[in-house]
Image (cartoon, grey):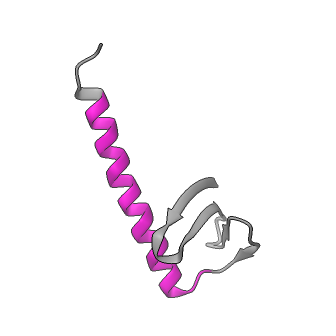
Amino acid sequence: MSLKLYVDAMDAVVVEVSADGRVRLENEDWSRPTLQERRAILFAATTAIEELTELVEILQDGPAE
Protein backbone atom coordinates (compact mmCIF):
# COMPACT_ATOMS: atom_id res chain seq x y z
CA MET A 1 0.00 0.00 0.00
CA SER A 2 1.35 3.38 -0.98
CA LEU A 3 0.82 6.37 1.32
CA LYS A 4 2.48 9.32 2.98
CA LEU A 5 2.31 9.40 6.75
CA TYR A 6 4.55 11.71 8.75
CA VAL A 7 5.62 10.08 12.02
CA ASP A 8 6.69 12.89 14.32
CA ALA A 9 8.33 10.63 16.90
CA MET A 10 10.61 9.19 14.21
CA ASP A 11 10.93 12.40 12.16
CA ALA A 12 10.23 10.21 9.13
CA VAL A 13 7.62 9.69 6.44
CA VAL A 14 6.21 6.22 5.83
CA VAL A 15 5.63 5.87 2.08
CA GLU A 16 4.78 2.17 1.69
CA VAL A 17 3.62 -0.71 3.84
CA SER A 18 3.66 -4.36 2.75
CA ALA A 19 1.14 -7.02 3.73
CA ASP A 20 3.81 -8.76 5.82
CA GLY A 21 4.34 -5.65 8.01
CA ARG A 22 7.48 -4.22 6.48
CA VAL A 23 7.60 -0.48 5.92
CA ARG A 24 9.52 1.76 3.58
CA LEU A 25 10.43 5.19 4.84
CA GLU A 26 11.03 8.05 2.44
CA ASN A 27 14.52 7.75 0.92
CA GLU A 28 15.16 4.40 2.66
CA ASP A 29 14.85 0.69 1.87
CA TRP A 30 12.25 -1.75 3.17
CA SER A 31 12.64 -2.78 6.82
CA ARG A 32 10.75 -4.35 9.68
CA PRO A 33 9.93 -1.67 12.25
CA THR A 34 11.01 -2.21 15.83
CA LEU A 35 8.32 -2.39 18.50
CA GLN A 36 8.94 1.28 19.35
CA GLU A 37 8.72 2.25 15.66
CA ARG A 38 5.50 0.24 15.23
CA ARG A 39 3.96 2.05 18.19
CA ALA A 40 5.02 5.44 16.79
CA ILE A 41 3.59 4.58 13.36
CA LEU A 42 0.32 3.33 14.87
CA PHE A 43 0.00 6.46 17.00
CA ALA A 44 0.60 8.72 13.98
CA ALA A 45 -1.86 6.74 11.85
CA THR A 46 -4.56 6.80 14.54
CA THR A 47 -4.11 10.55 15.00
CA ALA A 48 -4.28 11.10 11.22
CA ILE A 49 -7.48 9.04 10.99
CA GLU A 50 -9.10 11.08 13.76
CA GLU A 51 -8.09 14.37 12.13
CA LEU A 52 -9.27 13.25 8.68
CA THR A 53 -12.57 12.00 10.10
CA GLU A 54 -13.11 15.41 11.72
CA LEU A 55 -12.27 17.13 8.42
CA VAL A 56 -14.75 14.96 6.50
CA GLU A 57 -17.48 15.62 9.07
CA ILE A 58 -16.89 19.38 8.96
CA LEU A 59 -16.96 19.49 5.16
CA GLN A 60 -19.99 17.20 4.88
CA ASP A 61 -22.04 18.94 7.54
CA GLY A 62 -20.92 22.51 6.92
CA PRO A 63 -22.83 25.02 4.86
CA ALA A 64 -22.47 24.62 1.12
CA GLU A 65 -21.54 27.77 -0.76
Provide residue 14's location: percent of width, then percent of height. Answer: 60, 64
Residue at the (60%, 81%) spot, across then down: 33
Provide residue 30's location: percent of width, then percent of height. Answer: 73, 73
Please say if 45 is above or below 35: above
Provide residue 29's location: percent of width, then percent of height. Answer: 76, 73
Q: How many marks?
A: 0
Does the magenta-highlighted stretch encompass residue 43? Answer: yes
Q: Quadrant of the C terminus?
A: top left
Depth order, front residue of 26/21: 26
Residue 11, located in which quarter of the rendered image?
A: bottom right
Main secondary structure of the magenta stretch? helix
User: Is 47 positioned to the left or the right of 38 in the image?
Assistant: left
Q: Which residue is at the far bottom?
A: 35
User: Is 9 positioned to the left or the right of 12 in the image?
Assistant: left
Residue at the (43%, 66%) spot, across then down: 44
Residue 59, located in which quarter of the rendered image?
A: top left
User: Is 17 positioned to the left or the right of 37 in the image?
Assistant: right
Please say if 49 is above or below 28: above
Does the magenta-highlighted stretch encompass residue 19? Answer: no
Q: Quadrant of the N terminus?
A: bottom right
Residue at the (27%, 36%) spot, across then down: 57
Please say if 33 is above or below 48: below
Q: Which residues are magenta?
A: 33-59
Depth order, front residue of 55/19: 55
Depth order, front residue of 20/57: 57
